[in-house]
Amino acid sequence: GFDVIYTGISKTPAEVVSAALQEGVDAVGLSSLSGGHMIAFTGVIALFKKSGSMPLIFAGGVIPPDDVARLKKAGVREIFGPGTNTGDIIAWLRAALDEKSRARRAKKRRAR
């Protein structure tokens, strides 16, 4: 039930954000297995903030618990570790996107 745009591996934060903005995505999933998650993920968030557009950002990979807290504080909504059931990720994503959509509609109603 999702359209997925896969940008490939080893993309810079600028390449990820550019593709996401071009496609008008609602969410961005980031993955790190190499330990570069703090720089890459916070770089993506900073570029989205600079653009004025902030999709829902979630992540997965091998991320130490101390970094999970820091990344969530920076703006990553959820982080899924190795072995997480794909169905659980999809259920979370559906609920998070529904929540974001409800908030957007409520904001539009208040603006009227």
Image (spheres, rainbow, N blue to C red):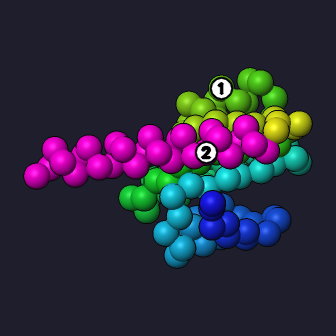
Judging by the rendered image, the residue that carries numbered circle 2 is 93
| Rendered view: 4 above or below 32 | below
Give me the residue at 71% from left, 42% from top. Answer: 89
Give me the residue at 81% from left, 64% from top. Answer: 10
Mark 1 is surrounded, within 10 Å at the Cα level, by few (under 14), some (14 to 19) or many (20 or more) other residues, namely few
Amino acid at pointer 2: Leu
Magenta residue span: 86-112
Q: Quadrant of the N terminus?
A: bottom right
Mark 1 vs mark 2: give the one in front.
2
Q: Residue furthest front?
A: 1
Q: Which mark is residue 69?
A: 1
Q: Is residue 102 magenta?
A: yes
SS for callout 2 = helix
Q: Earlier in the sequence, mark 1 or mark 2?
A: 1
Q: State whether residue 40 appears in this view.
A: no
Q: Which mark is residue 91?
A: none
Left or right: where does residue 16 sit relative to residue 86? left
